Image: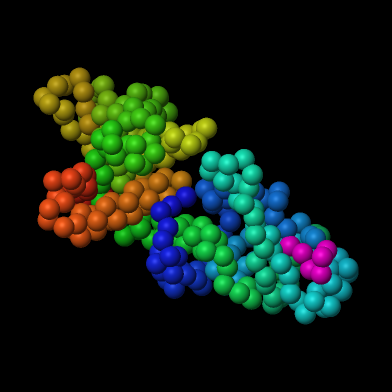
Amino acid sequence: MSITTSQQIQRFYSQYKDTEVTFTKEIIRAIRLIPSQVYFKSLGHHWPCIIYSTSMTQTRIIATLNESFYEQAKKSGNIIQIRYAFQHESKSNPFTYFIAAKVTGFSPYGKTDKDINFISASYTQRPPDSFIDVIGTILDANVSSAQRKEERVVVTPDVAEMIGLKAKETMVFIDQVPRKCLIRDISFGGAKIILMGIGKFLVNKPAAIRLFFDEAVSFTEINGSITRCEEVSGRKDITALAIKFDDKVPMQYKLKLNEFFKRQKVRKLVIREAPADDHKNNPGPAPKNTPDPTGM
């Protein structure tokens, strides 16, 4: 999912260890969790469960409990082992591990079926680095998207490859009408696209841009609205449109763009620390990202 070093794992743990991530469908899809292979066990007995939320120090899960569970929990001192399963990006077999936790409380999930419960539990040990990476990467992308909302990235072919975009060419739906377009630049808060048409008639229209990533079989669609238009090279038949995204930006997009910024930061550090004699062998400065005062 990300470029990860031991220093970054430690930063994630120090900065985000008590911050919860709620496992929505979007988050589950983004982190490649396999819900059907998640369960917890106590003294060798297994119970299917749903991860409702987790931090790096505690979790809340949903499970159907019966008297046998409470008996097992009492015998074990309320210690359970929670099994997580994630799908590899490039391998067919998932990677799995158990995290030990101590149950700290129960509460009914709903009024109709009292056997379904929220289980609150605190991890009894620091989770594996891979788990810290998964949770930390999600939280880091959220923080980055807020702090760097106006920082634009010009989408060259090289940048598109680094971000994982299949191509600069894509589709935008303006007032639900599909149009082909080129992506000129992107940010956490918006995008600028180029397409055929008269821009002044499209301003203030709702827009949804589709992005296709290399490893995805489907697309990521981001909703927003067109805030302004510009002429392109004096041609009246082509226009550049600025799209301001709605507040709900897909997590996959946040992860991709945040990963790009992390790569750029590492690259700049390498260039800065390279000996003067090595400058001729350097690939050159990273693509320049410029702040956009309009939030696009």
Against 238, residue 294 (above or below) is below
Foreground of the two, 27 or 259: 259
- Picture coordinates of residue 113, whole percent (x, y): 81, 60
How many numbered tags mark residues here?
A: 0
Residue 43 located within the stretch drawn in magenta: yes
- Picture coordinates of residue 130, whole percent (x, y): 53, 59
Q: Main secondary structure of the magenta part?
A: strand
**Residue appearing at x 61%, y 74% in the figure:** 125
Foreground of the two, 294 or 269: 269
Left or right: where 44 falls relative to 240: right
Q: Residue furthest front?
A: 277
Left or right: where 157 falls relative to 212: left
Residue 172 seen in this snapshot: no
Foreground of the two, 151 or 246: 151
Residue stretch rendered in magenta on the structure: 40-45
- The quarter of the picture where the C terminus appears is top left
Residue 155 located within the stretch drawn in magenta: no
Against 166, residue 290 (above or below) is below
- Picture coordinates of residue 213, whole percent (x, y): 43, 36
